[in-house]
Image: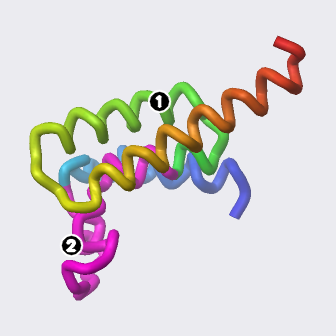
Amino acid sequence: MGKEDYLNLIEQLDEEGFDDFTRVRELLGLATGSDNGWYTLRIGELKAMLALAGGDLEQALVWTEWTMEFNSSVLVRNAPTIIAACKRCYYWHRKKIASRCNI
């Protein structure tokens, strides 16, 4: 998949009107155990990862903040790992772009 494909998937999720709080496993009809990331992954969290993969840092920041806010109000075992990964990716991409632009 190319970067545009990731961003197009976010757009498609928005156009279809899926609730950002919906679990991805429920949307896809996956039967998972509670011992993996698919069990708790929400569409809003997926959008953060897709935006990072697509290189849209502004949108990634918006969805990472959504993820942090959502997970601060809900006790989710995997939330700290997901949030930390999103933050690391965001700052890594930001640093990479800054070095290319000599900022």
Q: Amino acid at mark 2?
A: Glu
For image coordinates 25% across by 85% down, the residue present is: 32
The boundaries of the magenta stretch are: 22-49
Q: Whole-percent x and y of residue 62?
A: 41, 28
Kindly state the secondary structure of the residue where label 1 is placed: helix
Query: Residue 77: which quarter of the image?
Result: bottom left
Does the stretch in magenta take in 45?
yes
Left or right of 27: which side holds 101? right
Q: Which residue is under mark 1? A: 61
Kindly state the secondary structure of the residue where label 2 is placed: helix
Residue 15 visible (yes or no): no
Q: Which residue is under mark 2? A: 26
For image coordinates 23% across by 87% down, the residue present is: 31
Mark closer to the observer (2, 1): 1
Left or right of 52: which side holds 30? left
Q: Amino acid at mark 1?
A: Leu
Q: Whole-percent x and y of residue 67?
A: 30, 41
